């Protein structure tokens, strides 16, 4: 007759043996070929800018604050009239900034003396959005003729960057596939189905590309729109499968 104690000990022993048999293959997994492969791909698309944002400014100085402000106001009004006369719509123009600050004389007039206020500086900026980069030169000419004395920035943009971004994504996917295929071949494996695709958020928006081409403009300062580059990065994970003619590992 079987002892009750022996029966109580047999059940846990059988469970332990079954667990070891199940864990055995998992412990040997590091010797097997990898089952998936994750690769990052990069792509870039280039397009000619089709709009420009120009920030123009005026800086005026006078001994009195009111005089400096009046001079800046008059120049800016004259410049606005000339800009609108070029055919720029009023909704494409907006005031950027208005600033009035004292001008100090920092000369050493004596030990412990504070800088002396010698006048005032007024500064105003005007932001103009153009639907054609070729109009930047004539715009700057008109603004300078009206009395503005500062071109703060000229920014070239794409009105709709979605098409360029889609092309950059396609190129990033192709780049990831080429890299993954090379790695799989080195492992004597092949790419199977795509398991996951992620668009990474550190891609860059439109930015100037090194290749430049000059505008055919007869007047105004030379403006080179060149090309804008839009970048994309993706992460793709594939299932790895045996190559044709080889046996699974």
Image (spheres, rainbow, N blue to C red):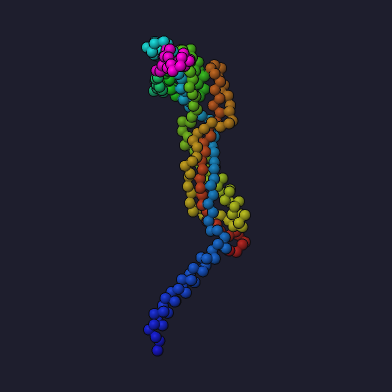
Question: x, y percentage for residue 110?
Answer: 46, 14
In the picture, residue 241 is in which quadrant? bottom right
Q: In the rendered image of this protein, does residue 202 appear above or below residue 142?
A: below
Question: x, y percentage for residue 65?
Answer: 38, 13
Question: Taking 189 as reference, is 102 left or right?
Answer: left
Observer-nearest of 67 and 87: 67
Q: Is residue 148 visible?
A: no
What residue do we see at 61% from left, 57% from top? 188
**The magenta stretch spans which residues?**
100-120
What residue do we see at 50% from left, 40% from top? 203
- Quarter of the figure with the C terminus: bottom right
Question: x, y percentage for residue 48?
Answer: 53, 30
- Quarter of the figure with the N terminus: bottom left
In the rendered image, the residue lying farthest to the front is 111
What residue do we see at 55% from left, 58% from top? 34
Question: x, y percentage for residue 105?
Answer: 46, 15
Question: Taking 242 as reference, is 55 left or right?
Answer: left
In the rendered image, the residue lying farthest to the bottom is 1
In the image, residue 26 lies in the stretch drawn in magenta: no
Q: In the rendered image of this protein, does residue 238 appear above or below residue 22?
A: above
What residue do we see at 42% from left, 14% from top? 116
In the picture, residue 87 is in which quadrant? top left
In the picture, residue 45 is in which quadrant? top right
The image shows a total of numbered marks equal to 0
Q: Is residue 100 visible?
A: yes
């Amino acid at each position: 007759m079987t002892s009750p104690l022996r029966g109580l000990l047999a059940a846990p022993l059988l469970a332990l043996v079954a667990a070891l048999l199940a864990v055995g293959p998992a412990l040997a997994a590091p010797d097997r070929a990898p089952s998936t492969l994750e690769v990052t791909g990069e792509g870039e698309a280039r397009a000619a800018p089709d709009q420009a944002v120009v920030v123009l400014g005026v800086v005026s100085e006078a001994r009195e604050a009111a005089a400096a402000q009046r001079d800046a106001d008059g120049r800016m009004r004259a410049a606005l009239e000339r800009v609108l006369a070029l055919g720029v719509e009023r909704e494409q123009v907006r005031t950027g900034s208005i600033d009035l600050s004292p001008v100090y004389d920092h000369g050493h007039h004596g030990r412990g003396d504070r800088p002396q206020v010698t006048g005032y500086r007024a500064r105003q900026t005007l932001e103009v959005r153009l639907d054609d980069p070729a109009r930047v030169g004539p715009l700057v000419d008109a603004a300078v003729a009206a009395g503005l004395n500062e071109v703060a920035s000229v920014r070239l943009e794409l009105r709709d960057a979605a098409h360029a971004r889609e092309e950059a994504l396609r190129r990033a996917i192709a780049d990831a596939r080429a890299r993954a295929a090379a790695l799989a071949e080195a492992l004597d494996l092949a790419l199977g189905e795509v398991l996951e695709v992620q668009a990474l958020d550190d891609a860059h928006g439109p930015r100037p590309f090194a290749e430049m081409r000059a505008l055919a403009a007869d007047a105004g300062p030379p403006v080179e729109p060149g090309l804008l580059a839009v970048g994309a990065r993706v992460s793709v994970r594939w299932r790895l499968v045996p190559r044709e003619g080889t046996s699974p590992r």
